Amino acid sequence: MVPLLDLKAQYEQLRQPINEALLRVAASQACILGPEVEQLERDLAEYLNVRHAIGVSSGTDALLIAFMALGIGAGDEVIVPTFSFFATAGCVSRLGALPVFVDVDPKSFNISPQAVRDAITSRTKAIVPVHLFGQAAEMNALMEIQNETGIPIVEDAAQAIGTQTSDGARVGTIGVIGCFSFYPTKNLGAMGDGGLVTTNDDLLAEKMMRLRNHGMEPRYYHSLVGGNFRLDAIQAAVLRVKLPHLPSWHQARRRNADAYNNLFAQHGLSTDVSGTFDSDNSVLIPTVVTDRSVADYHIFNQYTIQTRSRDALRTHLHKKGIGTEIYYPVPFHRQECFAALKTSQAHFPVADSLSSTVLSLPIYPELALHQIEEVVATVAEFERTPRPAF
Ligand SMILES: Cc1ncc(COP(=O)(O)O)c(C=O)c1O
């Protein structure tokens, strides 16, 4: 039995300080925003090295607030990768703007800067790189685009808290606004929903602070139409306990990724990381696409392999008690809710290929080496079984 994620294992390690934090909030009855959230915001601003870190209700709401703060609405276009979690595009549509889908890079799975350039029009109001699975998008090339065109970059760093670019900066602090999620499966997960927006721009920070609380300042005076996007004190208190452990959890995830890479190679299953299949390699392991050795370039929120017999492999692993997930089986341009955009026939070959080949394996920090060995041995067992030609 190897579950995809074991949140109880992490809780067991931190049971006492987490319980104390929960009781502290219960005793204070300061349940929403307040001192716990303010302290978390200071701690996260310091960790990320950014001027403003503003706690919000979820990663989805972080994206929504970011777009609202930039005044995005009807008639505007926002460029997003077609291969990501739904919220990246959904928040654009919810504001009446048009998500413009572009393809991703076959090695990093992140937005292709050239595809972004090709998609820019006079209506483009934002570009949204997603640091998918915890790996930094190509921020240097993307920042060149922002600097040349003036189009703001909103980083979807939901899966990438602590990820560093090749220059060592933390993602989410490089573009105009960064958006993070504390959904429990993230490297820094709350005990419920939570999120964060970050910026170095004082005016945007002030606007986002107001937007998260109905655009209200002072009380019952509303200069903007905002919403209830506030972070709970319970979530903040739990996150404050977990934040100091984040670097060691990143390290453990990286160690697990290295173990997978070595074991796949030992089993002769993965011969290269070129991002394309050839006759020799039946499993493509994740590629860390950086020319510099920056430890946190990829924080492995997910360890995602590619295989052409993905669905059958997944069924085999499931039968053997090994948890996996497909992030993501349908790219945005083929989602039913976007049918009116008439993008289902668009040519996004990388995203289309990834959606039928990706499979995420267990990678959580508490995973034991023998469990990783079990996963790889089970993949190897499947790959050795003769199947009809692909
Ligand atoms: C890339 C990406 N963007 C946005 C979100 C939305 O975050 P949340 O689930 O906290 O609303 C997620 C989280 O699932 C995500 O993975």
Image (cartoon, helix red, strand yellow):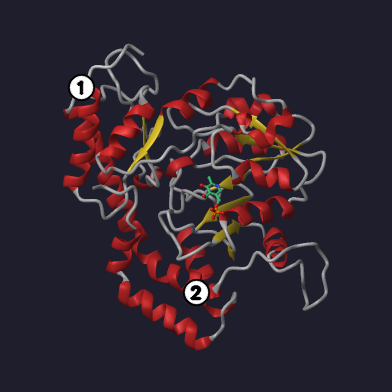
Q: Which three-letter amino acid code belongs to the residue tagged 2?
A: Ile
Q: Which mark is residue 234?
A: 2
Q: Which mark is residue 288?
A: none
Q: Evaluate whether residue 1 shows in this view.
A: yes
Residue matched to label 1 = 384
| Percent x, y of residue 101 | 64, 31
**SS type, badge 2:** helix
Write down the quadrant of residue 261 in the picture. top left
The residue carrying pointer 2 sits among few (fewer than 14), some (14 to 19) or many (20 or more) residues within 10 Å by Cα, namely: many
**SS type, badge 1:** helix
Write down the quadrant of residue 122 in the picture. top right
Q: Evaluate whether residue 285 shows in this view.
A: no
| Percent x, y of residue 323 | 32, 44
Question: Is 310 in front, or is 231?
Answer: 310
On screen, residue 68 above or below 334:
below
For marks 2 and 1, the one nearer the N-term is 2
- Residue located 61% across and 25% down the image: 115
On screen, residue 45 above or below 336:
below
Q: Which three-letter amino acid code belongs to the residue tagged 1?
A: Arg
CA separation in Å, label 2 and label 1: 49 Å
Q: Is residue 270 left or right of residue 274?
A: left
Question: Is 101 in front, or is 124?
Answer: 101
On screen, residue 290 above or below 384:
below
Question: Is 53 in front, or is 168?
Answer: 53
- Residue located 31% across and 45% down the image: 362
The residue carrying pointer 1 sits among few (fewer than 14), some (14 to 19) or many (20 or more) residues within 10 Å by Cα, namely: few
